[in-house]
Every structure is written in C-alpha cells, then in structure tokens.
Image: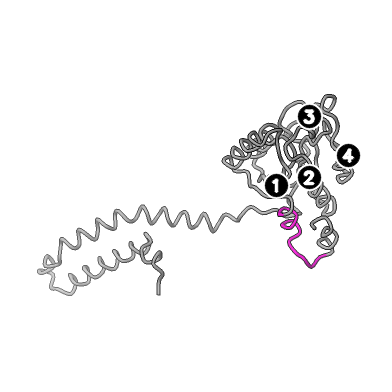
Amino acid sequence: MKSEPEKFSPASQVLRCLDELEHLVESSNSLPLTHHKIVDEEAFFIATQRLKMLLPAAAVASEATSERKATAPARLHKGSTLLLIVDVQERLMPAVHNADEVEKNCLLLARAAAHLQIPVLMTEQYPEKLGRTLSSIREAAALATPVAKMRFSACEGSTRDAIKTSGRDTILLCGVEAHVCILQTALDLLEEGFSVFASRDAISSRTPENAQVGWERMMREGVLPTSAESAVFELLADAGTPDFKALLPFLK
C-alpha cells in the first residue's frame, strides 16, 4: 500500500490521468466506428488538461530525484582531505575570542592529520607584526612549514599551488579570523572547485559578533560546518583500528 506522500506525488497523479485516458479510449474502441463520438468528450478533455498541468511538475520531481541519487553527500575521507591551518599566531591569538578553545581544537586536528598522514598546510599573516604560528601547533604539524602571506586569503601563492597539486579535493579549515582570512580563504577555495569544511570550534574572531558574521556568510556560500571532534571521528571512520586507539587519548 502506498504512503500518503506517494499517492499524491506528481508522478502518481500523472499515472492516474493516463489510466483514465486509457479507460476512455478503450470504451470508445469497444463501440462500432460510427459510434465513437459517444465517448464522454468532456471527461476526455478534463483528463488531458489535468495531464498537461501535471507533466511539468512530474518532470521537475523526477529531475530532483535523479540529482539526489547522483550526488553523493560531501564527506571527510583521510585519502582526499587536506588540513589548512590559517594564521594561528602568537600576537594575534591573545585578542581572539575563545582563543584557548580554538588552540586546543586546532591542535587536535593537527595531531590527527599528522597521524593519519593527511597533508597539512599552515599560513601566517604578516608574521613580522603578528608573530609565528603557536609552538604547540607547529610541533603537532612538524612536517608543515608555515607560509607567510600579506593577502587575507590563504588560497594564494605557494599555498594555493600546494593545495592544487596535492591531489586532495576536500579542504578542512581551522584558524582565525572567521570573518576575514578564513572567510576569504573559503570563498577562494569554493571558486576553485574544492569541497570546504570549516571546524566551528577551531575557528574564531576577536569578537563573537564578527565570528558569527563569518559563519553565516560561509554557510550561505556552501561551506560545510563541522567540529574538530566530529571531523576526527569522520576521518577515522572505524573504532576498531590502530589509528582510533592512537588518537583516543586526544579525544577524551
């Protein structure tokens, strides 16, 4: 038995109209040729008009269903993800809202990426003025050398080149500030065709209001929200692996 939504879907209504038309035609064909006009012309006209109205809706519904089936949900996979840590710097972080939380969660992501052999890139905005990347982050991502920049977006110069040649199509973002460097980086990455995830608890601004502005804009443009812990669990995918056991102490 069909559910209520199925009974009233555009496709189901089109099928009912076609059944009605078939019934009318069969009724007409059962009569002698000279009596075909006896078929209920008004009923035939009403059924054909309904069919004309329903077909566009059915086509749209069918196309939407096909798109949903063809488009897999965006996922964080360790084989296709790159971690980009933006401007988590010594002289900037003291002014950042929830700085300790941001550092802790950037550190979690950096440790997980290093253990899972996920590429890590780091940037520093005008390091002569704002200082170096926090030592805790640099130690966790030991294989990554921070790249200095003047543009607010981290998707530029050698960092952009490294992203494009990494073979990774998904970028996981963390760092500061949400409404400036993170936002502009995310927009540039989206323009380049990457799937972009942003870790909500590993990103902030100097004020919560500006952080919220950055988040709202990014979500509207198609950035996918996550958290540091959620991202790590998604990258791990399985609790029965050595990787999970190795990272578990950092998840408690």
- Residue, disc 2: 106
Quick check: 20 above or below 106?
A: below
- Residue, disc 4: 135
Could you tell me how far apart the alpha carbons at marks 4 and 1 are, in whole angstroms? Answer: 28 Å
User: Is there a contact, CB below 8 Å, between mark 2 and mark 3?
Assistant: no
Marker disc for residue 125: 3
Question: Which residue is more in the foreground, 201 or 72?
Answer: 201
The residue that appears at 47% across and 54% down in the rendered structure is: 64
Side of 30 where 125 appears, left or right: right
Could you tell me how far apart the alpha carbons at marks 4 and 3 are, in whole angstroms? Answer: 16 Å
The residue that appears at 87% across and 41% down in the rendered structure is: 138
| Labels 4 and 1: the sequence-earlier one | 4
Over which residues does the magenta segment extend?
230-241
Question: Which residue is more in the foreground, 240 or 41?
Answer: 240
The residue that appears at 88% across and 39% down in the rendered structure is: 135
Could you tell me how far apart the alpha carbons at marks 1 and 3 are, in whole angstroms? Answer: 24 Å
Q: Secondary structure at mark 3?
A: strand
Side of 187 where 249 appears, left or right: right
| Image spot of residue 220 (x, y percent) | 57, 41
Q: Quadrant of residue 160?
A: top right
Could you tell me how far apart the alpha carbons at marks 2 and 3 are, in whole angstroms? Answer: 17 Å
Could you tell me how far apart the alpha carbons at marks 2 and 4 are, in whole angstroms? Answer: 12 Å
Looking at the rendered image, the disc whose residue lies closer to the viewer, 1 or 3, is 3
Marker disc for residue 169: 1
Quick check: 136 above or below 58?
A: above
Tag 2: Cα neighbours inside 10 Å, few (<14), some, or many (≥20)? many
Name the amino acid type tagged 4: Ser
Side of 3 where 94 appears, left or right: right
Tag 4: Cα neighbours inside 10 Å, few (<14), some, or many (≥20)? few
User: Is there a contact, CB below 8 Å, between mark 1 and mark 2?
Assistant: no
Name the amino acid type tagged 1: Asp
Looking at the rendered image, the disc whose residue lies closer to the viewer, 4 or 3, is 4
